[in-house]
Image (cartoon, coloured by chain):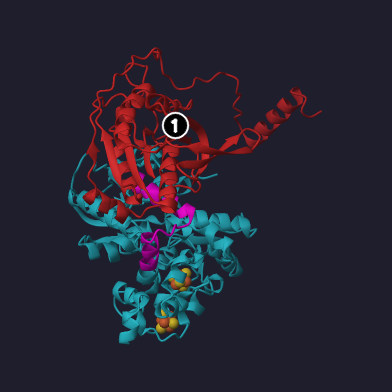
Chain colours: A cyan, B red
Amino acid sequence: MTTLQTDPGMEFLAQRVDGDPAFGCIQCGTCAASCPLGAAMEYPPRQLILQARSGNLDKILSSPSLWMCVGCHTCSSRCPRGIELADDLWPALRDRAMQEGIQPPAELQETFQNIFKYGNSLGESARKRLDWAKELDVPLRDLSKEPTAVEVLWLVCDYPSYYPRNQVVTRDFARILTALGVRWGVLGNKEKAVGDCDRLFGEEGLFEMLVENNKKLFDKHQFEKIVTLDTHSYRALEHFYPRYGAEYPVEHYTTFLADRLDLLKPLLTKPVKATVTYHDNCCIGRRAGIFDQPRMLLEAIPGVKLVEMARNRENALCCGGGGGGMWLDGHIVEHGGQRLSDQRVRQAAEVGAEVLAVSCPLELSRFEDSTKVAGLENKLLVRDIIELLAESMDLGEKEK
Amino acid sequence: MNIAVVVRQVPDLVEPLEIDASGAALDVDEVEFLINETDDHALEQALLLKESGGGSITVVAIDFGQVDDVLYTAAAKGADRIVKIPYDDDDRPPRPAEAAAMIAEAVKDIDAELVLVGSSAHDELEGVLAPLLALKLELPYLGVIRGVKPGEGGSVTAFKEFPGAAMAQMNVKLPAVLGILAADQPPRYVPVSRIRAAMKSTEFEEKETAAAVPEPNVTVLRMHHPEPSGRAEMLTGSEDEVAARLAEILKEKGVVQ
Ligand code: SF4
Ligand code: SF4
């Protein structure tokens, strides 16, 4: 063991990985076999550790496979030695690679730069943060303009603020909160990206900067809890912010609403007749164990028939958007991987679902694109649970 | 090789541009600034030259907009010295002739063998800054360069693209000023932890200049957003109506029979 620890690659892994040191790895290969992109990776997770042990850290750092992990957490959750591959090992290796001047794929660089310069991953103007609310028909409290104590500080986050498909869901959520009598507020143009569940895919300096800035911002406001639609932000706030001394009570909207089912149920009056399957996203699912609440919300909607995909709950297949995957599709496909969302929509169609229900903002566009690729357009609709709730509450936007 | 790189700030087009009360200039308070893209390439080219042949890089900039962010990033990428030229008008970016006069003074002190500047900027498409600077420095100038390699005995090889995709390879005796359109590789990404470290450790050298600034002989009378010319017909209505009108137009114009 001592010899292993003195190897620079291993020493690095031992230092950087919390919990069980990576040299506790028994090379069982469970991680690599579980990885949905493992077959396409030059160095799947087991190999990462093996190569580092053999002093070949350079090989791993410069391999394109370093940028193929989509942070789905399947490897970590199945590792018999509890090695935190997804949340710690991969980001640490990516950080190390960038420190050594190895360039991340171009699309991801642009995303990092967008977050650094504009405070959002889409590279949009901060002044347009509230554009989603232009057509909003319920009152909005912009705490950056009128600071006041609220029950819920709603962090709207990047996609729900800016991406047109997501903005519909964002407005629906505002209506639902209002209908439930929640006293909520948003940070308006002052809001900045939270970061991501795996410390921004290895861009640790950027993540640290976001935490520091957000902590200053949040501390100026009075709220009982943070609620967000963004599963990645939720996980970052819940799991990683405390590592930097920034601790806030935070909930994803699924648990927040499930806790208020008694209030919600009487409002769910309009049947939404559809066979629905729910996609467990990796951030609140495998990572945080939130499997029941999204299903409770769907089952509360009259008319909804909930069916399960063969891979569900902790075994759900990732949409491929995590770990920076949202901006790595091109890189992953170029190096022999597949877009996981294309597989996932087929799995939904196989169980006869008419609606693929999601609760993560990255998934709407990913899955909608994939229904087109898979020839399922108009056969399988992709809808956020919020949209289905709003429709049943007769609050939803009438989309054509 | 001792290389000077000039970087300047340009309005960030992510933000909607506003015209100020005078009606003849951008409202600078409403503008965010970022590094001029070709200047970013000039910096990258300098870093590549330094990596292949050693030397030192001094980045020179006029203190305007959010230039500090750009300078710390340059330091994080490997610039050795940062020279900042004080400029007190917050409301008006320096004109190219003015900028050239100020930068030339600062560059003279550096004793650079090679001066790299972006060959144009999106608020200065004619690209006059680089040649004006060469004029002030009394150095030869070559612009629209797409790559520079170290050459033999006090020279570099510069690649210049001409229309029709003809590429010229030129031997440039130093000292000289090169206007860079693109570096040999895209500007590198530098992790934010490095930029943050640079913020703590980098000292900017301030260089006051007393350059005589020529009075402009062109005055902007009015600045305005493009006005619709009435040449476009927006088709509205249902899909069928739009399709029918489109078919009509194609017939009118003789595109289809
Ligand atoms: S699953 Fe865990 S113990 Fe097994 S090879 Fe992977 S990291 Fe090692
Ligand atoms: S987190 Fe997912 S994609 Fe990344 S290595 Fe583990 S199983 Fe593979």
Q: Nearer the viewer, residue B106 or A275?
A: B106
* Direction right: furthest residue: B257
Asked whether the viewer can see residue B92, the reply is: yes
Q: Which corner quadrant holds the C terminus of chain B?
A: top right
Q: Secondary structure at mark 1?
A: loop
User: Which is the main secondary structure of the residues drawn in magenta?
Assistant: helix
- Name the side, left or right, on which A364 lies relative to A144: right
* Direction front: furthest residue: B153
Percent across and percent down for residue A257 are 34, 60
Disc 1: which chain? B
Mark 1 nearby-residue class (10 Å; few <14, some 14–19, many ≥20): many
Asked whether the viewer can see residue A396, the reply is: no
Percent across and percent down for residue B245 are 68, 28
Query: Disc 1 residue type?
Result: Ala
Q: Residue B208, relative to residue A192: is it above or below? A: above
- Name the side, left or right, on which A163 lies relative to B94: right
State yes or no: residue B224 in magenta: no
Please state the extent of the stretch shown in magenta in the rendering: A91-119
State yes or no: residue A95 in magenta: yes
Q: Residue B157, relative to residue A390: is it above or below? A: above
Percent across and percent down for residue A198 are 36, 64
* Residue at (45, 56) in percent of width and height: A362
Percent across and percent down for residue B102 are 31, 27
Q: Which corner quadrant holds the N terminus of chain B?
A: top left
Q: How many marks?
A: 1
Q: Mark 1 = which residue?
A: B121
For ligand 2, tell me if the residue under mark 1 lies within 8 Å.
Answer: no
